[in-house]
Image: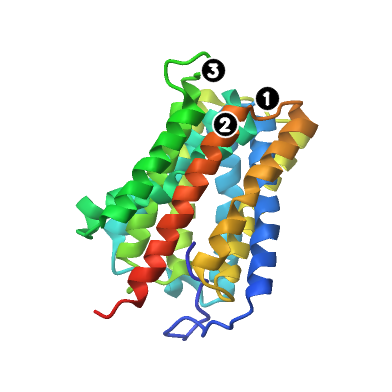
């Protein structure tokens, strides 16, 4: 997760206050908002195309970010030193959003959520060619084990295989690419600038494409689309706030509670529960992700 936007005139992020229980509480609350957004997106795909769902989400996201920009200094806050990286990050986030909503149309909510957990492992893999990072054998082993978990969830060639599950995997890859772009410009770009550019780019590109598959919307569909945008924005914002209060290695295990909410929502709303193979694969993916986070923490403590 990205650090919070800086108030006008502030050159460095606010000093973190150690309050681990508050950080955990914020992550748990964020997981509810994020799962609610995914659940509403899945419901909307029954009525309108996934791209249109994404367009409604980005429209709300853009409105929220522009309101924050206006309150924190206006267009001056949109100056960027890395326009190309901003563009590439925005494309990655947009591709991830569209592909994940497409996957939700055909996959159970819990299955799509479990597959999305592979994103941190993709970040590890992409760090080598893009950032030139050296990855030790421990993290490589954890990453490979995580991908085994993905194969268990997806089950290519098996009886439960769905082509849509590949959309969720590629969505996670696109999100990982966006996170790498974020890391590359984190020293020069404020989070507020980065988030706003991603919002505007996503809304602009989806606005160009959505007329070709437009489906008329009812007031109910419109309200649900706004809910998707608000819930996802609030969820990510709560995660940003959580990382002000505790280390990533402490908070990472609690982010996987989202699979529990996805399973409960899937049961209550769609009358579907994840099967045993999905749960086994999710545990493997989560375990490898947690170990990778642990190794990141160990490396961060090593002297340069």
The residue shown at (74%, 39%) is 264
- Measure how far apart labels 1 and 2 are at the Cα level: 27 Å
Camera-side residue of 125 and 135: 135
Specify whether 114 is left or right of 190. Answer: right
Camera-side residue of 22 and 11: 22
Q: Which mark is residue 278?
A: 2
Query: Looking at the picture, how far across and down is residue 189, in whole percent?
Result: 37, 70
Specify whether 63 is left or right of 1. Answer: right
* Residue at mark 3: 160
Answer yes or no: do the residues labelled 1 and 2 have beta carbons within 8 Å?
A: no
Dot 2 or dot 3: first in sequence order is: 3
Residue 238 falls in which quadrant of the image?
Answer: bottom right
Report whether residue 119 is seen: yes
Report whether residue 207 is seen: no
Residue 107 sits above or below residue 70 on the image? above
Between disc 3 and disc 1, the foreground one is: 3
Query: Looking at the picture, how far across and down is residue 300, in whole percent?
Result: 35, 73
The residue shown at (49%, 61%) is 1
Q: Secondary structure at mark 1?
A: loop
* Residue at mark 1: 47
The residue shown at (24%, 79%) is 304
- Measure how far apart labels 3 and 1 are at the Cα level: 25 Å
The residue shown at (47%, 16%) is 158
Query: Looking at the picture, how far across and down is residue 106, in whole percent?
Result: 58, 23
Answer yes or no: do the residues labelled 3 and 1 have beta carbons within 8 Å?
A: no
Answer yes or no: do the residues labelled 2 and 3 have beta carbons within 8 Å?
A: no
What is the tally of numbered marks visible in this picture? 3
Residue 179 sits above or below residue 111 on the image? below
Query: Looking at the picture, how far across and down is residue 52, in whole percent?
Result: 57, 33
- Measure how far apart labels 2 and 3 are at the Cα level: 10 Å
């Amino acid at each position: 997760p990205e650090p919070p936007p800086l108030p006008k005139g502030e050159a460095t992020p606010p000093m973190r206050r150690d309050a681990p229980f508050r950080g955990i509480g914020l992550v748990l609350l964020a997981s509810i908002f994020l799962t609610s957004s995914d659940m509403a997106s899945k419901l909307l795909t029954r009525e309108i195309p996934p791209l249109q769902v994404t367009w409604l989400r980005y429209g709300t996201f853009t409105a929220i970010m522009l309101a924050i920009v206006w309150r924190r200094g206006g267009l001056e806050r949109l100056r960027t030193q890395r326009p190309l990286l901003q563009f590439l990050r925005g494309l990655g986030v947009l591709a991830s959003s569209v592909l994940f909503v497409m996957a939700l149309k055909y996959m159970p909510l819990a299955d799509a959520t479990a597959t999305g957990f592979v994103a941190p492992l993709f970040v590890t893999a992409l760090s080598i060619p893009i950032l030139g990072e050296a990855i030790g054998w421990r993290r490589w082993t954890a990453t490979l084990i995580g991908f085994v978990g993905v194969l268990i969830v997806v089950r290519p060639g098996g009886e439960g295989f769905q082509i849509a599950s590949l959309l969720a995997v590629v969505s996670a890859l696109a999100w990982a690419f966006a996170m790498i772009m974020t890391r590359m410009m984190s020293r020069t770009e404020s989070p507020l600038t980065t988030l706003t550019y991603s919002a505007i780019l996503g809304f602009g590109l989806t606005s160009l494409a959505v007329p070709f598959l437009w489906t008329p919307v009812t007031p109910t569909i419109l309200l649900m689309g706004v809910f998707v945008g608000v819930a996802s924005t609030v969820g990510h914002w709560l995660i940003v706030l959580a990382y002000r209060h505790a280390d990533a290695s402490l908070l990472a295990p609690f982010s996987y509670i989202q699979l529990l909410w996805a399973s409960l929502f899937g049961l209550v709303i769609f009358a579907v529960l994840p099967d045993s193979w999905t749960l086994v694969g999710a545990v493997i993916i989560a375990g490898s992700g947690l170990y990778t986070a642990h190794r990141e923490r160990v490396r961060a403590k090593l002297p340069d």
